[in-house]
């Protein structure tokens, strides 16, 4: 029966191979992170998280945006970094400068453009397109491309709903318990948006929806 000491010794014997494969995967990931694709951004955030997880926390669902090769490279690097011989940036000459360049590239404040109609066009901290605006009653709303990996969707609705209830003859704010989440935005597929578009277009022109039959 294998003892804990036997298991530790067997693991230590594999460390040279783990580190060799990990360094090779790390170099591949850095090359991707210095590119200019959606996967480059995710890999860059992953490497920044390894460099300083407290300052650069990573939403692990971001990894769903990577192809299987890059996911495997991330896991290989994590395996190496679980028993580090040195910090990830120290595998490269001028590593600190390289990681600072990644930080400037992938964590910069997103640009914002405001249209004459009051739409603020920008991106989320994760790089997804976002249009923010206020509705007729002054509620903050948004239209955002979803991060869902298996289906192309967008979010549309009130960003942060202000819940009220009738009390003592008037409407009063309803405090939410800590950790409560109110689903206030629709998660629409491309087909659903496509089905809605004729009605929205008709509304802009006539104030009514399309294909509505009228009596008489």
Image (tube, rainbow, N blue to C red):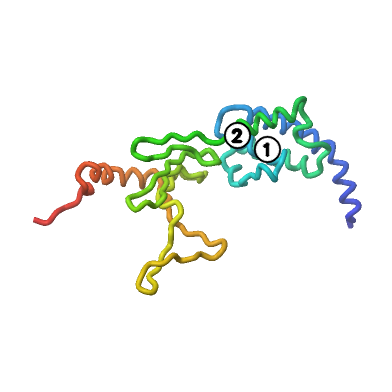
Secondary element type, mark 2: helix
Left or right: 148 as drawn, with respect to 205:
right
Q: Quadrant of residue 89?
A: top right
- Depth check, front residue: 146 or 71: 146
Residue 129 position in % (x across, y down): 47, 38
- Depth check, front residue: 106 or 210: 106
Q: Mark 1 highlights which residue?
A: 48
- The quadrant of the image that shows the N terminus is bottom right
Residue 158 position in % (x across, y down): 41, 52
Query: Measuring 36% from the left and 47% from the top, which residue is drawn there?
Result: 192
Left or right: 130 as drawn, with respect to 206:
right
- Depth check, front residue: 127 or 4: 127
Mark 2 nearby-residue class (10 Å; few <14, some 14–19, many ≥20): many
Q: Mark 2 highlights which residue?
A: 106
Q: Is residue 76 visible?
A: no
| Separation of marks 1 and 2 at Cα, in angstroms | 9 Å
Residue 76 position in % (x across, y down): 73, 39
Q: Residue furthest bottom?
A: 168
Q: Quadrant of residue 27?
A: top right
- The quadrant of the image that shows the C terminus is bottom left
Q: Is residue 95 above or below residue 152?
A: above
Counting every numbered tag in the picture gives: 2
């Amino acid at each position: 029966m294998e003892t804990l000491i036997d298991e530790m010794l067997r693991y230590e014997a594999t460390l040279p191979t783990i580190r060799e494969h990990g360094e090779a995967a790390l170099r591949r990931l850095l090359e991707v992170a210095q590119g200019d694709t959606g996967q480059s951004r995710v890999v860059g955030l992953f490497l920044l998280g390894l460099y300083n997880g407290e300052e650069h926390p990573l939403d692990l669902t971001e990894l769903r945006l990577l192809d299987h090769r890059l996911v495997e490279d991330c896991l290989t690097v994590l395996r190496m970094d679980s028993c580090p011989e040195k910090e990830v940036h120290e595998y490269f000459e001028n590593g600190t400068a390289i990681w600072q360049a990644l930080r400037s590239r992938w964590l910069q404040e997103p640009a914002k453009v405001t249209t004459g109609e009051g739409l603020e066009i920008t991106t989320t901290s994760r790089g997804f397109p976002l249009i923010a605006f206020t509705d007729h009653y002054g509620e903050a709303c948004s239209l955002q491309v979803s991060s869902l990996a298996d289906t192309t969707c967008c979010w549309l609705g009130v960003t942060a709903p202000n819940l009220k209830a009738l009390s003592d003859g008037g409407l009063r704010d309803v405090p939410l318990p800590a950790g409560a989440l109110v689903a206030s935005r629709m998660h629409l597929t491309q087909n659903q948006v496509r089905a809605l578009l004729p009605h929205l277009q008709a509304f802009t022109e006539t104030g009514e929806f399309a294909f509505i039959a009228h009596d008489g």
